[in-house]
Amino acid sequence: MKKNYYTKEGLERVKEELDYLENVRRKQVAKRIKVALEQGDISENAEYSEAKEEQAFVEGKVLELRGIVKNAKVITKNKNNTGTAGLGSTIAIKDAGGEKKEYTIVGSGEADPLKGRLSNESPIGKAFVGKKKGDSVDVETPGGVQKYTITNVS
């Protein structure tokens, strides 16, 4: 089974969501089902149907999150002193126009490019993995090939 790479903080967020679903949302949904059942005939009871749909959603999400936690591999800040970009590395890059950006390479479950977190499985993340400070990297994007220079790896 495929490993899910997470930072310690990212895995904690997943565990917190799982705990909330198991210990809070389940009880809320069960209460909604109970109230709907008390109304009598469930054959045309929209509240009952909605509560059962929500229950199915919650249980599906619980199973998904349990799988993530079970198969999670915690990544730590890249401490290899080789200066090579990899999972847990933070890279500073500069595009051909001189615009500077900084990203941390994370597993796909934590990726959020707008918040500076690139998936190691994304085209841009893959392009930077294994590269060092000073390397030029060509990244295939929908708008064409973009050229970046790595200005720092930490």
Image (cartoon, grey):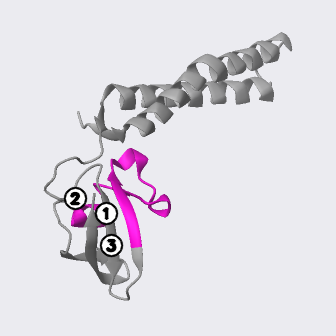
* Residue occupying image coordinates x 50% and y 35%: 13
In this view, the residue farthest toward the right is 39
Residue 60's label in the rendered image is none
Residue 134's quadrant in the figure? Answer: bottom left
Mark 2–mark 3 distance (CA, rounded to whole Å): 12 Å
Mark 1, residue position: 91
Q: Is residue 25 above or below residue 34?
A: below
Mark 3, residue position: 93
Residue 133 seen:
yes
* Residue occupying image coordinates x 69% and y 21%: 29
The disc labelled 3 sits on which kind of residue? Ile
The disc labelled 2 sits on which kind of residue? Ala
* Residue occupying image coordinates x 58% and y 28%: 58
How packed is label 1: few (under 14 Cα within 10 Å), some, or many (20 or more)? many
Disc 3 secondary structure class: strand
Mark 2, residue position: 85
Mark 1–mark 2 distance (CA, rounded to whole Å): 7 Å
1 and 3 marks in contact (CB < 8 Å): yes
Residue 116 lies in the magenta-colored region = yes
